[in-house]
Amino acid sequence: MDRLIITGGNRLDGDIRISGSKNSSLPILAATLLAEQPVTIGNLPHLQDVTTLIELLGRMGVQLVIDDRMQVEVDVSTIQEFQAPYELVKTMRASILVLGPLLAHFGKAVVSLPGGCAIGSRPVDLHLRGLKAMGADIDVVDGYIHASVKKRLHGARLVLDTVTVTGTENLMMAAALADGVTYIENAAREPEVVDLANCLNKMGANITGAGTDTITIEGVETLNGTNHQVIPDRIETGTYLIAAAATRGRIKVKDTDPTLLDAVLQKLGEAGADITQGENWIELDMHGERPKAVSLKTAPYPALPTDMQAQFTAMNTVAEGTGVITETVFENRFMHVQEMNRMGANIDVQGNTAICQGVDHLKAAPVMATDLRASASLVIAGLVAEGDTCVDRIYHIDRGYECIEEKLQLLGASIRRVPA
Ligand code: UD1
């Protein structure tokens, strides 16, 4: 298992390019299971999670042709298996995204039930409830979801109890090939849901309202091939901006979409960052100043993403003043706090709130990554710590950040990967 060694103290300064969105790539790759002809997807990030979904499709007998720029052509006409086995689902919960498409197109699916994970229990009950309302028979046997439908799924009015991103995506994909109209109410409004809807519509689906809390899907008979480029990764974008702010640095992120980051940019502005933006770039400059602590509450889009919470917490550790961060999406998403406190941070967790009194600087310590975004936050902590911080278990980071050490090196950070 590799580790990252970060020698803190350098101000980040430079330009980097943002990769395609992980959270768009996964549902869009799953959506190829709905098509009658090959679908080509571009701007896929080179990430472990993307590789896992590609492997999952490959094991089903789907044909994939990948070029050196991570453009993938997916042809499902050769599919033989309709299963997502435990050994893949346990490494990536988003494997559940194949359930809706398999069921809608082929009438059957067997998908391992994802277990709990470091950030909370994360059930998939809303995915299953929605599919049942659309006519699916669903049994859970020996940890596997067995789903089938006699003829085709049918449209339904679905009201989601909680805003769920992959739940909305799974149901939207299933509804695309159902008989009749499906309404998803209290739908997730995340940009990745919109990207998926745009891709499905290019395949011939009839979806309106994506990006609002009510999505209307008029089922069609078949879906066709298409060519789709995934949107830029807004979480990767935000992570590098926060890293630059925490180090009192300057950064220009290119190939991104500033319109997807309103809440994040507003908080960075409150932290004292000077931000300018163009159509596909954002520049942030701290002019050498220490960031001011920010207070925030995570919530579904367009509010502050839970996937940015740990990184803002890292910035607050060295900010001026006290920041209060409340996590409302996942119940156990403060695993990074104890690690940061071991580096000299002053954070007190009370229930779902982390109260952080900024300190002058952190001190390096060996730390352990517990999940994807927590590991990014520990890298940021390492960048602002005195000495060499060793971040262990970085396989988490490779699930979601393409070439993180190369990109940080380009920005002037001292970071290297070493085998454990
Ligand atoms: C997606 C993102 C993840 C992000 C999260 C919240 C992908 C691949 N992952 O995860 O990066 O952190 O959205 O923005 O896009 N819930 C239920 N029942 C369900 C489904 C969800 O109770 O059937 C609850 C969850 O426990 C959680 C909340 O709903 O408290 C939101 O989770 P959800 O939006 O489903 O997260 P994911 O789609 O798994």
Image: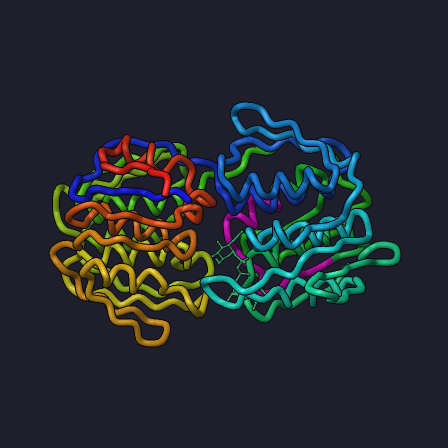
x then y, percent, for residue 136? 79, 62
Whether residue 78 sits left or right of residue 203 in the image: it is right
Depicted 273 relative to depicted 370: above or below: above
Magenta span covers which residues?
182-197
Image point 31% across, 76% down: which residue? 350
x then y, percent, for residue 268? 26, 51
- For residue 28, which quarter of the picture? top right
x then y, percent, for residue 394? 39, 47
Whether residue 169 sits left or right of residue 353 in the image: it is right
Q: Is residue 259 visible?
A: no
| Of 157 and 139, the residue lying toward us | 139
| Of 65 and 254, the residue lying toward us | 65
x then y, percent, for residue 94? 58, 52
Depicted 190 relative to depicted 19: above or below: below
Q: Is residue 293 visible?
A: yes
Image point 65% across, 27% down: which residue? 65
Image point 29% across, 36% down: which residue? 416
Can you say which quadrant of the picture contains the C terminus?
top left
Image point 58% across, 66% down: which residue? 123
Q: Is residue 194 magenta?
A: yes
Whether residue 243 sits left or right of residue 98 in the image: it is left
- For residue 153, which quarter of the picture? bottom right
Figure coloring:
rainbow
Q: Is residue 96 magenta?
A: no
| Of 414 and 137, the residue lying toward us | 414
- For residue 365, which quarter of the picture? bottom left
